[in-house]
Image (spheres, grey):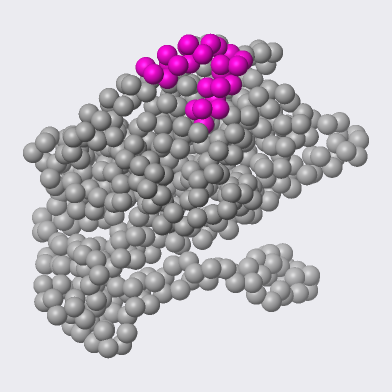
Amino acid sequence: MSTVLDLVILVTSLGYVSFAPFTKVEESFNLHATHDVLAYGVRSANLHKYDHFVFPGAVPRTFIGSVVLAWMTQFCLRVGSWFGIFSDKFDVQVLLRMVLASMNAVGLCMLRRAVSRRFGRPTGVMFVLLSITQFHLPFWMGRTLPNMFALIPANVALYLLIDRAPNSTRPSQSSVHWAIALLTFATVVFRSELLLLVGPLALQAILRYTSLYSVVKTGLIAGSLSVALTVVVDSYFWQHWPLWPELYGVYFNVVQGKSSDWGVSPFHAYLSSYLPRLLLSSLPLSLFGLLTDSRIRSLLTPYLAFVFLISGLAHKEWRFVIYVVPAFNIAAARGAAWLTSRRKGSLFGRLAFLAVAALLAGNCAVTFLLARSSFANYPGGSALNAFNQLFASEETVHVHISNLAAQTGASLFLHTRAPPLLTFLSGNGTQPTAAWVYDKTENLSVDALTHAKDVTHLIAEAAALSPTDAKGWVPVAVVDGFDGWRMNKPRDVLRVLQEEGLAEGLRALGGFLEMVRAEKLVILKRR
């Protein structure tokens, strides 16, 4: 049973990678950094070829996660090359995302085992059911956001704090120290907002588990080693000494207030908007866990403090609080286990069981809708993948990729006909010898591209393409994408059930909410 539950977590995360293999612009730094480490290696002579010197982004990011991910992916590539599994660079993108998803899945599996030990097997089962029926955590933990790299040590730290016997009153001091050290490392290297979690956790540790001296000593040692690691590694890759990316990010976003340029939200936004979307039914169920088990109250205290503290920052995004989701799921699993353990002979017991089942079903329904819309929300990846197949027989190609396409999936791994060609794939004999040009130059109009005679193809935005602009081009294919949901006039479901059977009745019910797709990109060839 234990192995089956772990496999369910792993398969769910890998399934999302398979069904949505493309990426968005916010994932591009780590994705392209991993690409460059795989393609060029880490020797200083090749660093000038790296993508981050062309598209540096608003603030520098650490290479540590990308280097580790590249090395782990490289091992899988070498093994896979023996069997001819990987045929082009896009396969490598899917593989590295599966490696990252697996790393995060292992963290959740560790948590699941600790939850079963601490709170009992029913709570462990509920933890799995709640986690896999949510959308954001399983969908995003295979995506190369810095937050998903930070989530790995954050989950291991949580595991260390709860992996103990049910009647244990406190974790061991070594577990507390390692948890603080891991969160300090994640704060220094990956995501500085985790400092707002380290603070409350350290305070709780001082008051209940260990001494002030031990906490300060642990923080100083872990922090110093982490700073040394990130400064050495990232100064090398960015060719700028000294560089501590997360400190630069804090200065840029907090001290200079630049994060507000991406929008501001009210203080209550995490509690009123982001957490309900992240947690779904885990939010109300976690309240039962808080009320019925003092161990849950102790567990959630630093995470609630983290949400309160980070709410003080004007710019808010769901990914800034993704680290609290596993902790809330533990609380929710405890609450669900308590409700389903009520005596089924009583009215309350039956209602409690039905309520938990209904909440899980609600999770599934919401996640199904979110997943469907997300799968259709990467037109750039779909367009460039289709382009590579449509013109596979052509030798000379110079394609301009529009901004929308570049932001919605047209990653370097889809530059399958351009150098660098990954050496791990050469044994398959399927890599092309001709080099195409994939051009992502920004702010070029279709008219300007028409006059640029070296450009042979366009992947243009459908909304910005006028009949006049398209005169010099032949449309080859149109790529659509998610454009919202539409509520249709409900049909008489009962009548359809009676007259046409169950299948048609379910189809009529499903047709009440319809996903709208619209033309997003057009693939054009010069006349």
As drawn, 56 above or below 389: above
Is residue 28 in sight in this rendering? yes
Q: Position of residue 494 (x, y in %)?
A: 79, 70
Is residue 424 in sight in this rendering? no
Q: Residue furthest front?
A: 255
Name the residue rendered at 20%, 40% in the picture: 238
Name the chief secondary structure element in magenta.
Answer: helix
Q: Where is residue 431 in the image (x, y as percent from the top left)?
A: 17, 51
- Left or right: residue 48 versus residue 220 is left
- Left or right: residue 213 versus residue 112 is left
Looking at the rendered image, the quarter that the C terminus falls into is bottom left
Name the residue rendered at 29%, 55% in the picture: 411
Q: Which of 141 and 265 is in front in this view?
A: 265
As drawn, 322 above or below 526: above
Q: Position of residue 71 (x, y in %)?
A: 26, 32
Q: Which of 325 and 10 is in front in this view?
A: 325
As drawn, 124 above or below 449: above
What range is drawn magenta here?
Answer: 197-221
Q: Does the magenta stretch include residue 199?
A: yes
Q: Does the magenta stretch include residue 263?
A: no
Looking at the rendered image, the quarter that the N terminus falls into is top right
Q: Which of 181 and 258 is in front in this view?
A: 258
Q: In which quarter of the image is residue 290?
A: top right
Name the residue rendered at 34%, 36% in the picture: 247
Name the residue rendered at 65%, 66% in the picture: 510
- Left or right: residue 231 versus residue 521 is left
As drawn, 77 above or below 493: above
